[in-house]
Image (cartoon, rainbow, N blue to C red):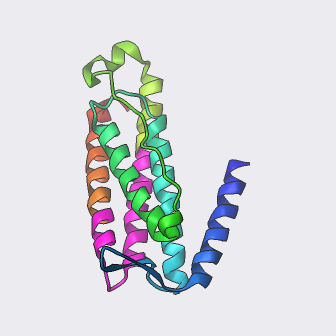
Amino acid sequence: MKLIRSLMLVSLVATIVGTAGAQSSIRRGHAHNSVTTSNPAVTQAISSLQQDLIAAVAAMKAALPIYEGNRVRSIHAAHASLVIVDHVMYGKNAAVRPKPSVTDHVAAKHAKSKYTAQQIEASQESMKQGLAALQAAVKDLQVAEGNTPNRQGAIVSNHLQKAIQDATTAISLHANQA
């Protein structure tokens, strides 16, 4: 049911964004484009980027709190990217996404005593799904930016690279247990 609602939302957003064309607002003397082009491929890439980021955050939140802060940093970096993408898609009307409240409160070396090997393996799979979604987000960002990257794209790219780095580090902490 949630998947159907999400798909309907994405198609609605893609339709709205596609028909809106290039809209800009003036703030502090600078023009800020909410959508840089009416190109359907770019619109689809931005929507895909948003969905990949949502999936990445959800997958990593489902993982156990055993990654010594790397999972948390990755989630927060992905969330920061998502907030920017929301503003690109919806402009000043973008809903505020609350920052995920997550902690990694179990040291990696104590994970085996607190969780079973199967739980750790399932957590690793969640982190790997999150990492795959982050990597897909990078590809979508490249399509959305095309040959004309902008400041927002550069910031999102930096957040994504940080998220990927932290997710990779988190996965490597328990790689020998999977």
Say whether residue 178 is magenta. Answer: no
Q: Position of residue 81 (x, y in %)?
A: 38, 58
Q: Is residue 79 above or below residue 151?
A: above
User: Left or right: where does residue 136 sit relative to residue 72?
Assistant: right
Q: Quadrant of residue 71?
A: top left
Which residue: 62% across, 65% down?
A: 10
Residues in magenta, as a range: 128-156
- Which residue is most to the front? 28
**Does the magenta-highlighted stretch encompass residue 130?**
yes
Asked which quadrant contains residue 105, the reply is: top left
Which quarter of the rendering shows the C terminus?
A: top left
Give the overall secondary structure of the magenta segment. Answer: helix
Left/right of residue 66 with respect to residue 90 in the rendered view: left
* Residue 51: image location, x then y, percent: 53, 59
Could you say where residue 78 lies in the image, as x and y percent from the top left?
A: 38, 52
Q: Is residue 99 above or below residue 63?
A: below
Name which quarter of the figure residue 144 lies in: bottom left
Spot occupied by residue 82 in the image (x, y as percentages of width and height): 43, 57
Res 118 visible: yes
Give the vertical position of 122 relative to 139 (above or below). above
